[in-house]
C-alpha cells in the first residue's frame, strides 16, 4: 500500500467513527431516510447522493446477476439497498476498517477492509462489481479499474464526479488527503472499448436540476422524487453536468430489456434504518 493510500485509510477510519453529541453515528450516505439528517449532506444537496444511487439501481435493473460486490461502499448503504430491491447476495468493501464495521453493525452486510489496487478476491468472483464515488480518490486509477474488471464476471458499474481540472490540480498540489485526484469526463472510460468491453456512459447531476424554483420545496419528498427522475433528461439535453454513470459490460448476454426489481425514486427515498448510536456500542465494547 502506497503512502497516500495509508494516510487516506487513517483519515477514513477517523471519519467513520464520527457521531453527534447524542452518540448518533454521522453517516456518509442518507441511511436514516429522507429529511432525517445525521449524514454528510445538507438536505438541499441530497440530490448529489440520491441521483447517483437512483441511476445505479436503474442500471442494475437491466442486468442479470445473483451477487454483487460494492468497492468503496462506506457503511454499506448501497449494498443493502441492492439486496433489498433485487434480492441478491451482496458484499461490501472499503479501505476503512471502521466503515466495514458500520456496514456489518447497521445493515448486517458482510464487509471486508480492502485496497482497491489489490482486491483480495478471485477472478470473476462476483457477477457485478459496483464502485461509486471512489475511483476519483484512488492513487492509481488504471490499476484500480483493472482490479474491478478482474473480479467482475459480467459487468462493472461506476459513478464518478466531473470536476474542473483546475480543482484536481489544486488537490494534487496541496496533497489533499481523500481529495479528488482524477478529472473524469464522459469519454474517460472509452479506452476500455479497445480492450473488447462495451462501455455505456451517462451524464448526471445537471446544475439545472437545482433550479431556484424548486429549492423552497426540497423538504417535500414528492419534489425530490420528481427531481431525481428529471435529472436524467436535463443532463442529457443540456451541457453542464457534475457526475457520470459508467456501465462496463464484459458479457452482453447479461443485459436484459425487461427490467428486474421495482426501482423508483420513492423506494430509494423510503429506504432507511433506525438511528444508530455509535457511542453506546463503542463504550460497551470497551
Image: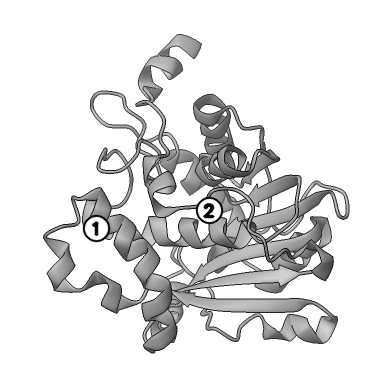
Q: Vertically, is 280 above or below 25?
A: above
Quadrant hosting residue 280: top left
| Residue 223 circle label | 1
Locate residue 211 relative to residue 245 in the image: left or right. left
Mark 2, secondary structure of its residue: helix
Provide residue 15's location: percent of width, then percent of height: 42, 42
- Towards the viewer: 203 or 190: 203
Provide residue 197's location: percent of width, then percent of height: 79, 77
Residue furthest right as drawn: 123
Residue 170 shows up from this direction: no
Q: Residue at x 15, y 57 (%)?
A: 217
Q: Residue at x 75, y 55 (%)?
A: 64
**Residue tagged 2:** 8
Q: Residues within 10 Å of mark 1 (few under 14, many from 20)?
A: some
Locate residue 201 relative to residue 220 in the image: left or right. right
Provide residue 227's location: percent of width, then percent of height: 31, 64
Quadrant hosting residue 252: bottom right
Q: Residue at x 45, y 81 (%)?
A: 169
Q: Vertically, is 225 above or below 168?
A: above
Number of labels in the image equals 2
Provide residue 141's location: percent of width, then percent of height: 65, 71
- Camera-near label (1 vs 2) is 1
Amino acid at each position: 500500500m502506497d503512502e497516500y493510500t495509508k494516510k487516506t485509510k487513517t483519515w477514513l477510519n477517523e471519519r467513520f467513527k464520527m457521531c453527534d453529541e447524542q452518540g448518533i453515528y454521522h453517516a456518509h450516505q442518507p441511511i436514516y431516510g429522507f429529511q432525517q439528517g445525521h449524514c454528510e449532506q445538507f438536505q438541499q444537496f441530497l440530490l448529489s447522493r440520491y441521483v447517483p444511487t437512483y441511476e445505479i439501481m436503474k442500471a442494475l435493473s437491466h442486468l442479470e446477476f445473483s451477487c454483487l460486490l460494492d468497492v468503496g461502499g462506506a457503511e454499506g448503504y448501497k449494498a443493502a439497498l441492492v439486496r433489498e430491491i433485487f434480492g441478491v447476495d451482496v458484499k461490501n468493501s472499503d479501505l476503512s476498517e471502521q466503515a466495514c464495521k458500520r456496514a456489518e453493525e447497521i445493515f448486517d452486510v458482510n464487509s471486508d477492509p480492502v485496497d482497491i489496487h489489490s482486491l483480495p478476491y478471485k477472478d470473476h468472483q462476483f457477477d457485478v462489481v459496483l464502485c461509486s464515488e471512489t475511483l476519483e480518490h484512488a492513487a492509481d486509477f488504471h490499476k484500480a479499474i483493472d482490479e474491478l474488471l478482474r473480479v467482475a464476471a459480467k459487468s462493472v458499474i461506476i459513478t464518478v464526479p466531473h470536476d474542473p481540472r483546475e480543482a484536481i490540480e489544486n488537490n494534487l498540489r496541496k496533497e489533499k488527503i481523500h481529495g479528488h485526484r482524477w478529472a473524469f469526463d464522459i469519454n474517460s472510460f472509452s479506452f476500455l472499448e479497445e480492450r473488447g468491453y462495451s462501455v455505456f456512459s451517462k451524464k448526471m447531476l445537471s446544475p439545472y436540476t437545482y433550479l431556484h424554483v424548486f429549492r423552497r420545496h426540497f423538504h417535500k419528498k414528492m419534489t425530490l422524487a420528481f427531481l431525481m427522475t428529471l435529472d436524467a433528461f436535463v443532463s442529457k439535453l443540456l451541457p453542464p453536468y457534475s457526475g457520470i454513470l459508467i456501465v462496463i459490460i464484459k458479457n452482453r448476454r447479461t443485459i436484459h430489456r425487461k427490467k428486474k426489481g421495482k426501482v423508483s425514486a420513492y423506494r430509494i427515498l423510503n429506504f432507511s434504518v433506525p438511528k444508530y448510536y455509535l457511542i453506546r456500542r463503542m463504550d460497551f465494547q470497551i
